[in-house]
Amino acid sequence: MSDERFNLGQVFETIASTIPEREAIVWGDRRLSYADLRDRSRRLAMYLHEHGLGASGPARGSLAGHESGQDHLGLYLHNGNEYIEGMIGSYMARVAPFNVNYRYVEEELRYLLIDSGARALVYHAAFAPVLAGVLPSLPKLELLLQVADESGHDLLPGAVDYEAALASSTPELPPVEPTPDDLYILYTGGTTGMPKGVLWRQHDIFRAAMGGRTYGTWELVESYEHLAARILPTGDVRVMSIPPLMHGACQWACFYYMAMGATVVFPTNTRSVDPVDVWETVARERVIGISVVGDAMARPVVEELERGGHDASTLLAFGSGGATLSVGIKERLLAVLPNVMISDVAGASETGVQMGVASTSGSVSTGTFEPGPGTVVVSADLTRVLEPGDEEVGWLAQRGSVPLGYFGDAEKTARTFPVIDGEHYSIPGDRARVLTDGEIELLGRDSVTINSGGEKIYAEEVEQAIIAHPAVADVVVAGRPSERWGQEVVALVQVADGQEVSAEELLAEAGKHVARFKLPKAISFLPHIVRSPAGKADYRWARERALEA
């Protein structure tokens, strides 16, 4: 096997050189070939280089895992070709791009841009008013590239129009030598704490999530020549990504499919999930696969399909990353499209893609996964790897291609990426158990575990039990203080439109799936459950509502 190591900019150059005329991105009336995308990405790369951005610090080998020797560029954007160009162009210039949550208010945005040490920002004009409020406190932020949109906001003082910047540049590669050790940065969502910037070597994230190995067979890409040879011979593979690119699962899905030579399709509306637009785009572009994040994103899409009137005959696959789909949603989708394969892919910002489970008509599964290479469960005391059938609840862990650390935080880096028996692991905080057949039962994030009467209750398993009721549109579970139990379980429930359900009925349904001591002590019915734009539960918000319930 080749020991060649990969840089994401060079990965894209290989793909674009092999299939230059094939469509890379389709978004509404925008259709960019791989050659178009390469041209625009190179122009951005040269623009960044000419403005003094790149690898301005020490080489990777002399840095600690939580340190960076590159300049950082924030991507404060809705989905679209500019986001992909921002990533690829940065990699070509040896600049490290990172994701910015476009739902942040001024205080949160200020924290992120200070914590990241951003020198440059590419942002949609719609976010100019929020950005304007924080710029005075960001002296390191030197370069602003504003992407015009329907908001019509004028350029901020000192900002440059994105298209004008590309037009003023050249489609030549900057005179720099990108390396496999250059950074890929992914900021966590901050739904249980402050956002943290996860630092990856590009070679490692390519192997872990972005096309460097084939999901399922886990075959590795051995060289750039091998990468070119495995590109699909046809341009008919078109996949739709609904989640925002600021979410790691969406970035990984897009780059994974581009590494195969597929066409990435975005719904026309990238500001919110528009189910009618999703299915109209599927029919128009003959999409064969859709990716979402969990029930919150999948449910309205499935409900629209159930209403009828849409041609989804080309669809072969429906996948969720970042959050699992409930059994009920899978069964409803398969009732309408019985030939579709549904996949849940588990992983984290700190691990990449770790494991998955497939569901088909007559065989629907949720909660247990077939682990990929390097995915294990380690003991609670972090001293050993658990074996199949070990009854101990441990930590879901990843070894092999793992991150370097958290930017600027040596303590959290040491805690999350420990060395066990001489090997580096990533242990971001999910509890899990190894079953007798070697499959892994994922229990949930330890930071949202509820300790009630000495028993650990995982919020996610109670959520899955409640959402099994057909009247439930969404649910988030959190703990609140209890004099008797220490903590008690509270369920925040959004009822589906046109449905009615009582707390007693929900408890009866949940009681079919989890032990009695795990059942909520209170159920609060709310008109809307707050989630991140990517569909992940906001547990900070949930804890506040649980206290009010």
Image: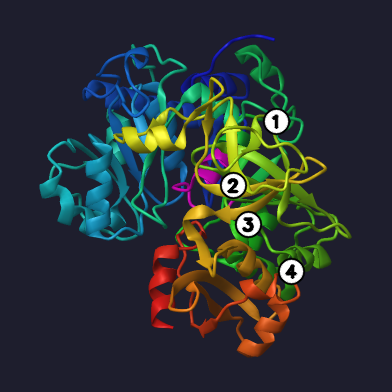
Amino acid type for the residue under numbered disc 4: Gly
Q: Residues within 10 Å of mark 1 (few under 14, many from 20)?
A: some
Residue 458 at x, y percent in the picture: 58, 61
**Magenta span has 252?**
yes
Amino acid type for the residue under numbered disc 2: Val
> How far apart, in angstroms, are the residues tagged by discs 3 and 2?
8 Å
In the foreground, 327 or 318? 327
> How far apart, in angstroms, are the residues tagged by discs 1 and 2?
21 Å
Q: Earlier in the sequence, mark 3 or mark 2?
A: 2
Q: Is mark 1 on a helix, strand or loop?
A: loop
Q: Earlier in the sequence, mark 4 or mark 1?
A: 1
Instruction: Give the residue pinned by disc 2.
Output: 265
Q: Which of marks 4 and 1 is in front?
A: 4
Q: In this view, does 302 lie above or below 439?
A: below
Instruction: Give the residue pinned by disc 1.
Output: 214
Residue 162 at x, y percent in the picture: 30, 40
Amino acid type for the residue under numbered disc 3: Thr
Q: Quadrant of residue 465?
A: bottom right
In the picture, which quadrant includes the C terminus? Answer: bottom left
Q: What element carries label 2?
A: strand
Q: Give the range drawn in magenta.
A: 241-254
Report if the CB atoms under discs 4 and 1 are less than 8 Å apart. no
Q: Nearer the viewer, mark 1 or mark 2?
A: 1
Q: What element carries label 4?
A: helix
Q: Residue at x 48, y 48 (%)?
A: 247
> How far apart, in angstroms, are the residues tagged by discs 4 and 2?
27 Å
Q: Nearer the viewer, mark 4 or mark 2?
A: 4
Instruction: Give the residue pinned by disc 3.
Output: 281
Instruction: Give the residue pinned by disc 4.
Output: 328
**Magenta span has 523?**
no
> How far apart, in angstroms, are the residues tagged by discs 3 and 4?
25 Å
